[in-house]
Image (cartoon, grey):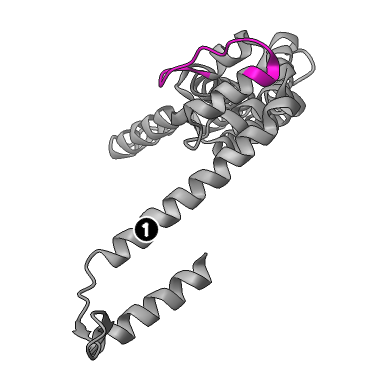
Amino acid sequence: MEAALDRSDDLNREKELLDMETVDWSTGINEGKELLGPHQRLWDGVKDYLDKKRVWYSEPLLKNNSEEADKDAEGCKGAAARSERELPEEAEKPKAVAALIKKEAQSFIRDHLPVLTLLANPGLRERHWDEMASTVGKPLPHNDRSTLQDMLRLELDKSVNDIEETCVNASKEYSLEKAMDRMQEEWAPLQIELKAHKDTGTYILTGSSADEVQALLDDHIVKA
């Protein structure tokens, strides 16, 4: 439509150069644009939803971000609801598509996002999977390529409350591990000066390193 508007302007400019009467093409084009707009927005929304749905269900768990998935699903649901409202009453099939997208997005948020939130978790170790398997009473085969769809085949959407504590604990442990790694990195370049303490056979910090050590210790105690 935009290209047609541009072309109509070009044609009218050419007519003016030839002293010919111009034609009002823009009114008809804009009317067509107005009529097709809701349909265009619907199908753009459908494509966006299907692209995101593929990521949620078919990409490895650790390639998903549950907060982004939540935001995207809410966006898709809202866009579908707007399409359903703005489409004309006679557009029954497009309105049905919009209603279906809205329903599927809501179903994902309600039923499957909780599973993704718990399992798209870099802190999950083999011991956590073993603990969850023991809790739900069946094996939970998994690997680095496991997807949300794989987890749904294991019916973990029916065991969210059972596995939640293990997953939350895994997240806390992971946060502690990352904090300890950062602390270790901060200690690594520190040069420590020592001097013998009288004739005790022990050593004490001396010089500027004593202040640096104290400052780093204070900082890490606060962060811990």
Q: Is the magenta region chiefly helix, strand or loop?
A: loop
Task: Write the residue at 30% across / 60% down.
Answer: 185
Task: Write the residue at 58% across / 15% down.
Answer: 151
Residue extending furthest toward the right: 89
Reply yes or no: does residue 33 show up in magenta. no
Reply yes or no: does residue 144 show up in magenta. yes
Closer-to-camera residue (32/205): 205
Residue 194 in the image: state x and y as whole percent.
Answer: 21, 81
Judge left or right: residue 135 versus residue 16. Answer: right
Judge left or right: residue 6 versus residue 93. Answer: left
How many C-alpha atoms fall within 10 Å of the one at disc 1: few (<14), some, or many (≥20)? few
Judge left or right: residue 223 versus residue 169. Answer: left
State the residue position of label 1: 182
Q: Is residue 149 visible?
A: yes
Residue 54 in the image: state x and y as whole percent.
Answer: 50, 18
Residue 212 in the image: state x and y as whole percent.
Answer: 31, 81
On screen, residue 205 above or below 78: below
Closer-to-camera residue (46/8): 46
Closer-to-camera residue (119/211): 211
Residue 181 in the image: state x and y as whole percent.
Answer: 37, 54
Residue 169 sits in which quadrant?
A: top right
Judge left or right: residue 224 versus residue 136. Answer: left
Q: Is residue 87 visible?
A: no
Closer-to-camera residue (35/19): 35
Q: Which residues are magenta?
A: 134-147
Q: Amino acid at mark 1?
A: Arg
Task: Write the residue at 61% across / 32% down.
Answer: 118
Task: Write the residue at 56% across / 14% down.
Answer: 140
Give the SS element for disc 1. Answer: helix
Residue 190 sits in which quadrant?
A: bottom left
Q: How many marks?
A: 1
Residue 81 sits in which quadrant?
A: top right
